[in-house]
Image (cartoon, rainbow, N blue to C red):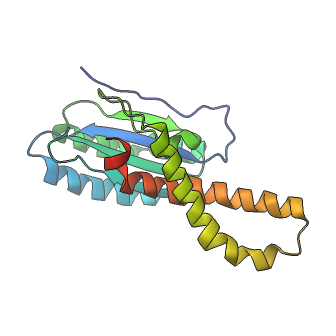
Amino acid sequence: MSNVVNSQPDRSMSKHHHVTAVITHRVRSGREAGYENWIKGISADARQFAGHLGVNILRPQPGGSSDYVIVLQFDSCPHLNDWLNSDIRKGWIDRVQPLIQEQESVQVLTGLEGWFQLPAQAAPTAPKRYKQAFLVWVGVMLVSLLVHPLLAPIMQYLPWLLRVAVSVAITVGLLSYVIMPRLTQWFRGWLFA
């Protein structure tokens, strides 16, 4: 039975809203090397598309399921749709069929839920709240300790409210696009245990 969740981005969203596509493939036993080569090829082609912000690959854990999770980020829904509906991607999807057990699952995340959400799987995937809180705390600490001291001299002449607004905007941006995706990947064994 397939666990396909092919959801397209909401058309009502802002055209310039960052989006993440979470794609799951259940790879056939013994076909992992071919699949790894496939990932390299499709990732290289995806990077050529406008708005591509990056890709992370979550590989199966030893003794676990054979699911590979591809976390693909674009700067807007139209750019993500251009990639998802492109003939180039369709060609790559045709090539992967002999390597996977069932149709791919695609989930499109449009907000901060992408910090911790992995695709729907048989086992519950929501991390415990204390783990989420801890990783958010680590992320905010990193921004506060490393970035804010560099910005303080530049922003010292701004009015207080504007300084706060800029500081919060930088913190949220770095958490959403840089820090939390990496922390979630680095700590996934602990976070989703």
Residue 37 point in image, percent of width and height: 22, 57
Report which quarter residue 96 is drawn in.
Answer: top left
Q: Exactly how many numbered labels are in the figure?
A: 0
Identify the residue at horizontal 80%, vertical 57% (top origin): 165
Residue 193 point in image, percent of width and height: 31, 41
Report which quarter residue 46 is drawn in.
Answer: bottom left
Residue 183 point in image, percent of width and height: 44, 56
21 shown above or below 148: above
Most distant residue in the right direction: 159
Horizontal arrangement in the rendering, residue 170 relative to residue 159 (left or right) = left
Most distant residue in the top direction: 1
Horizontal arrangement in the rendering, residue 162 relative to residue 60 (left or right) = right
Residue 150 point in image, percent of width and height: 68, 77
Most distant residue in the front direction: 130
Report whether residue 59 is seen. yes
Report whether residue 50 is seen. no
Identify the residue at horizontal 42%, vertical 38% (top origin): 127
Residue in front for this viewpoint, 187 or 34 = 187
Residue in front for this viewpoint, 79 or 23 = 23
Residue in front for this viewpoint, 56 or 118 = 118
